[in-house]
Amino acid sequence: MFATDTIVLTNFSSPDVHISYSLKDFCRSDTINLSGTGALSYQWYLNDYFAFPKEVGNVFNYTINSQTKITLVGTDENNCSTKDEITLMYIPCCGNASFPNAFTPNGDGLNDYFHVITNAVFEVFSLKIYDRWGNLVFETKNSKDKWDGTYKGHASESGNYFFLVKTKCYEEKNTVMNKGDILLIR
């Protein structure tokens, strides 16, 4: 006894998966917005394709702090998969910093805070502000923090203050010290 059967094979092409992003040069600690196209579902892997996916979905926001290989695996409606890979490297860029010499913390929305004006991301940052008697009136390790002209919850007197700023950029060996005077005007 013999039997016959017919099998229909369908050949599907692999999805055309691509990673796209907008930045050309990356600085350390930059967040890169990656997006995937060409598939129905997406899985993002870092450095090791065989690990668990770091992110699922067509968008992946990644903060680069070391050289990283990113693999995007895209799967289409026929359960066919393919991948695209990129290697992200950063350039050592620190940026510039400037220091205002006066501010007016009067609540008018103009020049109400003293802060370091910078676009840099520092590995080490320290800002200390002293009054004319050498008392520490403000201290921070966050380059985005601002002094509002108060000390222990009270408005500081008008007059001169002294600041010290220590910074160290990623990839740099030395810490840089900047110092100067601030005029607080009420």
Image: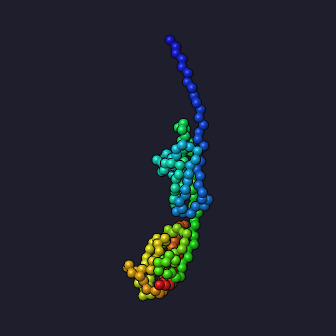
Residue 162 rendering spot, x and y as whole percentages: 48, 83
Front in this rendered view, residue 33 or 125: 33
Residue 4 rendering spot, x and y as whole percentages: 54, 17
- Identify the residue shown where x is 54% and y is 79%: 100
Residue at the extreme left? 152
Residue at the extreme right? 24
Relative vertical location of residue 119 with respect to residue 163 in this rendering, above or below: above
Residue 54 rendering spot, x and y as whole percentages: 48, 51
Front in this rendered view, residue 53 or 49: 53
**Colour scheme employed for the rendering of this structure:** rainbow
- Identify the residue shown where x is 55% and y is 69%: 119
* Quarter of the image where one finds residue 24: bottom right
* Quarter of the image where one finds residue 136: bottom left
- Identify the residue shown where x is 46% and y is 86%: 158
- Identify the residue shown where x is 56% and y is 76%: 98
Count of numbered tags: 0
Residue 73 rendering spot, x and y as whole percentages: 54, 45
The answer to whether any part of residue 160 appears in the image is yes
The answer to whether any part of residue 66 appears in the image is no
Residue at the extreme top? 1
